[in-house]
Image (spheres, rainbow, N blue to C red):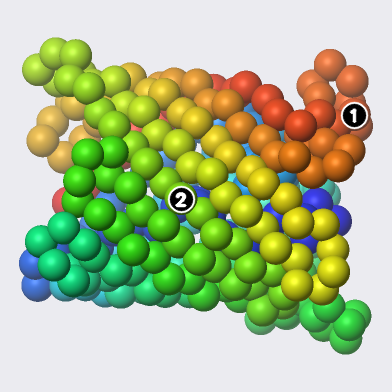
């Protein structure tokens, strides 16, 4: 399945940073994406992607959901529904460097797996769900770079990913936000190793101190032999990369 080709988190992903102070924080995002790609591999087309994150001190937890819209996603996976649960801890090492450690539990409700049914490479597992710990280092310097390593114990894959972002103010409440990441997936079982990446550009508009809308374009894919992105014009035909759009609303409390 396509999930096996990409199963070693990156995100996306995608870990949401916790609050620095010893107080409870809540953040949420409601997004729409015309494609859902994970580490360069497409799992669904147009999707609704809500998430919520809680933070206390250096500890945080996040729930992220992908809900495909329409029936076209059946050419990619059996529905593309996915629920990811993340718990982690982040803390500064110095004024410039901080570390982030945690674990993600991937679940797939549409694959008829129970919530606790884990995939096993030898075929003895009950379902498709996987567990993936991660460790990252972030730098408080221009471009906000960070480097992460992930290991999925079910699919026995190791992923290295580097991230960067930059924001340009356009007006009092508007900004132009650039982001991107590049990664490398190693299949420790002798499968295909590959490189993937994504770049994004959003225009964000703040409606308050705690909430903002965003909309933009993305470009991404991988160098997997045979392609990893479904071609919309010819259902079932794959290619190596694609352009898609996204929009949403983010808020913190």
**Residue at image point 45% right, 61% down:** 148
Q: What numbered label is drawn on residue 162?
A: 2
- Between 130 and 92, the residue placed more toward the observer is 92
Determine the secondary structure under disc 2: strand
- List x then y, in percent, for residue 48: 55, 38
**Residue at image point 70% right, 63% down:** 186
Marks 2,1: beta carbons within 8 A: no
Mark 2 surroundings: few (<14), some (14-19) or many (≥20) residues within 10 A = some
Determine the secondary structure under disc 1: loop
- List x then y, in percent, for residue 220: 61, 32
- List x then y, in percent, for residue 76: 81, 41
Is label 2 or label 1 in front? 2
Residue 91 appearing in the image: yes
Q: Is 92 situated left or right of 180 in this image? A: left
- List x then y, in percent, for residue 252: 21, 48
Q: CA distance from mark 2 to mark 1?
A: 29 Å
Which of the 4 image quarters holds residue 33? top right
Query: Which quadrant of the rendered structure holds the N terminus?
Result: bottom right
Q: In this picture, is 151 found above or below 7?
A: below
Of callouts 2 and 1, the N-terminal one: 2
Residue on which the image places disc 1: 237
């Amino acid at each position: 399945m396509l999930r096996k080709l990409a199963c070693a988190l990156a995100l996306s992903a995608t870990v949401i940073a916790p609050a620095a102070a010893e107080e409870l924080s809540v953040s949420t995002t409601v997004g729409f994406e015309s494609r859902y790609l994970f580490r360069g591999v497409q799992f669904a087309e147009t999707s609704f992607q809500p998430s919520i994150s809680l933070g206390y001190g250096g500890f945080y937890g996040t729930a992220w959901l992908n809900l495909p819209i329409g029936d076209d996603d059946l050419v990619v996976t059996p529905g593309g529904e996915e629920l990811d649960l993340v718990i982690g801890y982040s803390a500064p090492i110095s004024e410039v460097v901080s570390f982030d450690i945690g674990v993600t539990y991937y679940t797939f409700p549409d694959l008829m797996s129970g919530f606790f049914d884990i995939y096993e490479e030898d075929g003895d597992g009950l379902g498709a769900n996987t567990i993936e710990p991660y460790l990252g280092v972030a730098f408080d310097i221009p471009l906000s770079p960070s480097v992460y390593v992930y290991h999925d114990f079910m699919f026995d894959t190791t992923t290295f990913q580097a991230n960067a972002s930059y924001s340009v103010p356009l007006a009092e409440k508007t900004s132009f936000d650039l982001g991107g990441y590049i990664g490398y997936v190693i299949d420790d079982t002798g499968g295909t190793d590959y490189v993937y990446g994504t770049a994004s550009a959003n225009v964000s508009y703040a409606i308050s101190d705690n909430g903002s809308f965003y909309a933009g374009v993305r470009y991404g894919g991988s160098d997997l032999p045979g392609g990893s992105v479904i071609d919309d014009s010819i259902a079932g035909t794959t290619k190596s990369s694609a352009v898609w759009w996204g929009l949403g609303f983010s808020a913190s409390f």
